[in-house]
Image (cartoon, grey):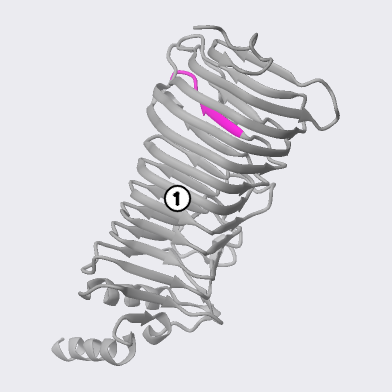
Amino acid sequence: EIIVRVVFVLTLVNFGFVNGQIYDVLKFGAEGDGTTDDSKAFVEAWKAMCSSGGSNKTLLIPSDNTFLLQPLVFQGPCNSPSVQVQLDGKIVAPLNKAAWSDLKSYEWVSFHKIIGLTVLGSGTINGRGSSFWEQLHFKGCNNLEINGITSFDSPRNHISIRDCRQVKITQIKIIAPGDSPNTDGIDISTSTDVEIYDTIVGTGDDCVALNSGSININITRMQCGPGHGISVGSLGRDGEESIVENVQVTNCTFNETTNGARIKTWPNGKGYARNIVFKDITLTETQNPIIIDQHYIDKGHIHVEESSAVAISNVIFTNIHGTSQKDEIIKIDCSDVTSCKDIVLDRIDITTFDGNKPLIECSNAYGKSTNAYDGCLKAQ
């Protein structure tokens, strides 16, 4: 046993380090040929880096290589106050579900409880759309930054942010077919102080989905489309208590999306969604430009009598302009139980693609408008 441990330590010293700070997965046995399972080498490289002291440690996934990975977890906390994953090569998933090593896992590449993590580079991660996992999953990672990478064809969420604080996501691309179901671009839950800016997201579901516990979220300069727009929710499913507040979506474009600025809650939910701003939005042939739906029901569920609802208040839609594929450009369908309060429609300039008169629908919604939509919102 002693001999084995000595050999392992020598292996790390001789093959794991480059310039004392960089941990190259090739040096830990990864083949990078796109067919050999390189999961073990990635985990061993991570463990060596994470357990070492000092700062500015980098796990290198080098360019000109393709790495096949099974489900794996990069586990923290690490001994270094900041760690970096430099993704310059390609990461690919198994070709189909039959080749998936852990059919109970719904997460492919996960990062857990890592403080000061940065994932950056010009590389790609490709789920091949062949199974059912979430592609990149970050849980309990505070002071997290994701920069420059490209995510292709995740079968489910491309990037999931859960239980994280102080997150920056910038200059990334997320790409999946417009008809691929449940392929959210960025899915956020129970996380605070998240900034997303200068990104391109085109998928078959929400470009960004803000679930319960999303607080202090700033999304700016996102190109969204195809997809379902940027959504708050869905919230309150199965009667759960949901909280979302302090959300800013600014200077974003929606190109041929099925929705634009959307808030969706289930009947009989609890909690609140408040202090939400959609500002300076450009639409190109968007189907449902502005929508609040408090009677959201997913496929496979039936409508039930409503006894409670997530309370929606202080929501501002301002300077939203462009074209709509449908005649109905605004739909604010609020609960009979709670209604929607302090809704603002300001400087809305949306024309229908076929030139028909735009239609507006509001129910149980209170607030004010600076447009010709004063009859839509009730005065408070």
Say if 157 sits above or below 29 in the image: above
**Nearest the camera: 106 or 15?**
15
Question: Viewed as shown, does residue 282 lie left or right of 132?
Answer: right
Question: Magenta stretch: dominant SS?
Answer: strand
Give the farthest residue toward the left: 2
Q: For the magenta stretch, what is the residue range?
A: 261-268
In percent of width and height, residue 92 lies at 55, 69
Q: Quadrant of residue 357?
A: top right
Horizontal and vertical percent position of residue 94? 55, 67
Is residue 263 located in the magenta-colored stretch of the structure? yes
Near-viewer residue (279 or 365)? 279
Left or right of 60, for residue 68: right
Residue 288 place in picture, x, y as percent: 68, 30
Name the image quarter holding residue 145: bottom left
Q: Quadrant of the N terminus?
A: bottom left
Give the amino acid type for the residue marked by disc 1 in the picture.
Answer: Ser
Residue 243 seen anywhere in this rendered image of the structure: yes
Q: Secondary structure at mark 1?
A: strand
Question: Residue at image x 64%, y 54%?
Answer: 176
Badge 1 crowding class, 10 Å Cα cut-off, few under 14, some 14 to 19, many 20 or more, is: many
Magenta region includes residue 264: yes
Q: Is residue 161 above or below residue 303?
A: below
From the top left corner, tell me how far across and down residue 175 is, in percent. 62, 56
Residue at the location (51% across, 40% down)? Answer: 209
Pointer 1: what residue? 160
**Is residue 187 rendered to the left or right of residue 299?**
left
